[in-house]
Every structure is written in structure tokens, then in C-alpha cells.
Image: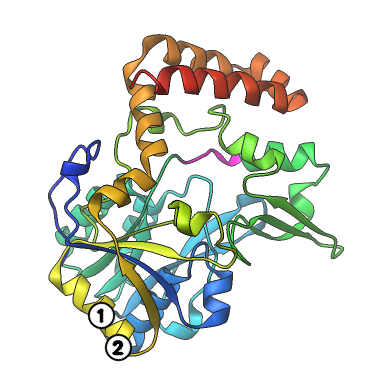
Amino acid sequence: MVVSKMVAEENVDDLTYQHVYITYSKDCDTRLLGTSGGFITELNRFLFEENKIKSSIAYFFSGKELFKPLIIYKSQDIVQAGSIYHEVDLLNFLKSNIDKIKSPIFITCLPCQCNPIEILMKSHNIEYVLVSLICSQQCEKNATYDFLKRQRIDINNVMDLRYRGNGWPSGMQVIEKDGEKHFFHNSKSEWNMYFHSTIYTMKRCFYCNKTFGTNADFSVSDPWIPRYSKKDAIGHSIVGVTSSQANQILKKMEKSNRIKILEEISLNEFFNSQLGAVQKKKAYKNFYFYKKAIAFFRTSTYKNFFNKYPKLHNTINKFCRYFFVKMV
């Protein structure tokens, strides 16, 4: 079912989607708890109930280790974790648990993980449905640790944590073991500065130009289109499908009243909705002096400076990014 073609994914002409839709789950709780519209959770649940899959990868919060993957075998065990903004070694988890997989399996992953997962599944004759998240970057766990430390929150005292969900665009939600709750907005708090600082970005992300994950069955992203992003408070999902089979599943979900499809959008509009991520990755790869600046940002001395003055670094980093992205 998965399209195996690998592309550079730096231009709209490289996108291989047959259709791109704006949609959301019609289950109010699923939509609200989702990162953006709850589509992936609704799709996962639907495929279990239609007997199209026998297992699925879910993620759960595990304290200091943050989020870990696990294999589930029924829709009742689906964990709606929302976005995970740290490294998860999904490929090695699948390798280590290959005998526990029941085929077909539902897998949600990053664009850079699609091809190796596809190769692994095929080598073991395991059928699968692959969902790729649209990705701008991924962070080391230290981004979360250092941010919480700055907020005077001990990770060892955290009972639960979510990076997204409970509305859109939402933000990090932390519950400590004594019941104290904290919320840090996705775009209006210091967490945004940590996530976009480049200080904690995974090294491989500076050499990656895979934003859309076009070799998955479904690609899903936030609705970074002005007519949605400017007024959305609950959540919508942009969903790209790469095959007629995937499109049939989506249409059947609509017919079964599981999702609402608001409109189909063009490849050009989909590409432009993620243009910031595409341009940022081009800038990372193409400009020597930008790489040198980022390397300096990531030194231990500068990291200490950042953790004292994140707003000042945010200003410096925005200027650097604007300067080099403008030349892309």
C-alpha cells in the first residue's frame, strides 16, 4: 500500500499526493485532545474496527524517559498522546519487538523514519499502514529537561506531560505528582524559544530535506493556512493521501461519519503551508556561515548563556534565520 518512491521534497513538483484534504474527527473529545484535528487517532481506531489492522504503535509518557513506544492490539488501548517533541528510536524498538507485531500494523512516524521502517517491514513480510507527520525538526530530550528546569519543575516529580492537545495550537501541559498543573503556550511561551533555538535540534535534522513524508500512505500536518490558523481554536488536520487505497479509506471514514472533510486543497497550497520548514532546512544545508553559527550555539558555554537569557538568543537566532532564509 505504501508508495516507495523517494524524493528530495524541496519543491512542490516533488509532492506525490493524489489528494490533500482539510479534515477533523467528528468525535469531539478525539478532536479536542488531538494535536490538530484528531485525524490520526480516528484513523487508527477506524482501521482496528474495520479489521484492517491487527496491531498499532502507541506512545505513552514514562516519567524521566518522557515518551516511549508500545505495541497495542485493539482500539480500546489507543493512547492519544499528541505530538512528541523529542527523539524516539522507533526503528530499533520495532526491530527489538518484531515478533510481537501482528500484521498488518499501523505506524505513525517522522518522514526520515519512513523508508527504513518500510524496508524492515517488507523484510519480515509484515503488512503495514504508514502515517507520516509533517516535520520541521526534532529535538533532543534535553530541550524538555532544560526548559522544565528553568521553570523550576523537577522532571522526576512530573506525573504527566503533553506537548500538544486540548485545543489548538495549545502547548506543553505538565502535572506534577503533588497535583500542581502548568501550561506553556505552543507559540507564546519560552517553550517556543527552546524548541526553535537550534541548540537542541537533532544533528541529523540539519542535513535533512524530508518535510512531507510522501512515501507514507497518509501525511498529516497542522493547518498552517491563514483561513484556518488565524481562527482555529479546536483543531483541523491537513491530510495528504498517496494512493487510491488510502483515499478510499478516508472517504469511507467520511461516509461512516467518523471525520468531516471540509475541502480539498491544491498541492501548491499544501506546500506553501509548510514553506517555513522547507526554507529553514534549505538554509541549514546551503550556507556555511549559518552552519558555523549553529555550531557555536550548540557549545556548552553558549548553552549555559541561552538557559539564562533565552529571549536574547531568540532575537539573535531569528535574525540569523531570517537573513539566510531570505537568500534561499
Query: Could you tell me what secondary structure mostly forms the magenta stretch?
Result: loop
Element class at badge 2: helix
Residue 324 sits inside the magenta stretch = no
Q: Residue at x 32, y 83 (%)?
A: 254
Q: Position of residue 8 (x, y in %)?
A: 20, 37
Identify which residue, 174 or 65, lies in the foreground: 174
Q: Is residue 23 left or right of residue 199?
A: left
Residue 108 in view? yes
Q: Is residue 113 left or right of residue 223?
A: left
Q: Position of residue 111 (x, y in %)?
A: 32, 48
Specify the segment rendered in magenta. Answer: 138-142
Residue under circle 2?
Answer: 255
Residue under circle 1?
Answer: 251
Check disc 1 and give the amino acid type. Lys
Q: Tell me how the rendering is colored.
A: rainbow
Residue 140 sits inside the magenta stretch = yes
- Estimate how packed mark 2 is, as few (under 14), some (14 to 19) or many (20 or more) residues with alpha carbons within 10 Å: few
